[in-house]
Amino acid sequence: MVDVAPNRTATLAGVGVVGSSHELTLDARLLVIAEAVDQWLDAFKPDVLAIERVFAQTNLSTVMGVAQVSGVVMVAAARRGIPVAMHTPSEVKAAVTGNGRADKALVTAMVTRLLRLDEPPRPADAADALALAIAHAWRSGAAFSAGSESSTPAQQLWRAAETKSKVTKNKEKPGNAWH
Amino acid sequence: MVDVAPNRTATLAGVGVVGSSHELTLDARLLVIAEAVDQWLDAFKPDVLAIERVFAQTNLSTVMGVAQVSGVVMVAAARRGIPVAMHTPSEVKAAVTGNGRADKALVTAMVTRLLRLDEPPRPADAADALALAIAHAWRSGAAFSAGSESSTPAQQLWRAAETKSKVTKNKEKPGNAWH
């Protein structure tokens, strides 16, 4: 959860990683995640929820589980009238680092810097989630107000990175798995 | 929804097919399905819910959506303490027709006969769902009581079909998409 100001400054509101035991049945594991998401959405009441867009082509062994979880998360948001946005990993990496193929270490470093944190969010999945939230706010223009003019050199850098990401993004072909 | 007696006789309790408009966003479509499933589970309070086990390898273009829906349905059951069972399409076909590669027409015909219906359930998805429910009850042995001895010639036929299905089922390799 991040707050993103009109001048694009992002501030950490909270971050969590939900895990479930391998020993549970699949439905019980999904319920653990569903209940955690319910709690987060009720506690923070976010304006929008961003999730990673995953392609069936990418990783067959995990794509089913990821899709099941994404369905559960989308319904949790929809029940509360919270819009859902989807971005690909490379869109997120490009938005926060300027490079759609940035590695996890760079994404984590940039997220740490953008949120002015004393130490990197752990585990790496937490940094990924925060990068996704920041990227959504920036890409959607939600963080811009028309009269916003102040920007630090760092923010100008991020804007340049975002412009670059818009060039990058057309190279991806989302297919029709999500339609 | 089917009731299956200890002597394996299956009776239709209700059947429905939920659709959602292509014009809705994905989260709104999943919510339509989630709310319908909630209503069915609350209305019928089933002892168990069976869903089709889908393999990521089978149909890349639809597997993501199917997995999202299955996640939503599993959580709906888990929230109510209803156990979830999964069976592959060929397990279901084998259980109700004796042939794991039966076509939709044969599955529909057998479901119609097993449930003693005047006409076939429509659309074909409804017949598939009923076949899955019957197959689960039979395969799990939930419908058997130890002292059950009465069986009509038709029921003996189904038992023979099920035995055949048990031979068939080991040919399938579920992979690890669901783990």
Image (cartoon, coloured by chain):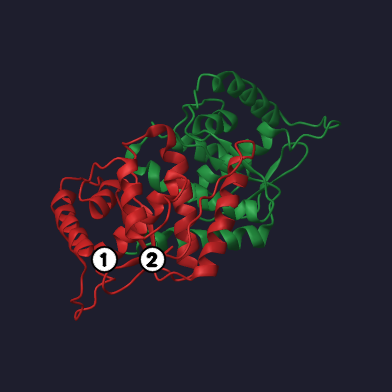
Chain colours: A green, B red
Residue denoted by label 2:
B11
Return the mark for residue A133: none
Left or right of A60: which side holds A54? right
Classed neighbour count for the residue bearing mark 1: other residues with Cα under 10 Å, few (<14), some (14–19), many (≥20): few
For the residues labelled 2 and 1, the Cα–Cα distance comes to: 17 Å
Residue denoted by label 1:
B140
Q: Position of residue A57 (x, y in %)?
A: 38, 31
Q: A141 above or below A170?
A: below
What secondary structure is marked by label 1? helix
Q: Chain of mark 1?
A: B
Residue type at the position of mark 1: Ser
Residue type at the position of mark 2: Thr
Corner quadrant of residue B24: top right
Q: Position of residue B160 (x, y in %)?
A: 15, 58
Q: B160 above or below B25?
A: below
> For the point 67% across and 58% down, which residue is it?
A44
Q: State which mark lies toward you, 2 or 1.
A: 2
Q: Earlier in the sequence, mark 2 or mark 1?
A: 2
Q: Chain of mark 2?
A: B
* Residue A13 visible in the snapshot: yes
Classed neighbour count for the residue bearing mark 2: other residues with Cα under 10 Å, few (<14), some (14–19), many (≥20): some
Q: Position of residue A162 (x, y in %)?
A: 63, 26
> For the point 18% across and 76% down, which residue is it?
B149
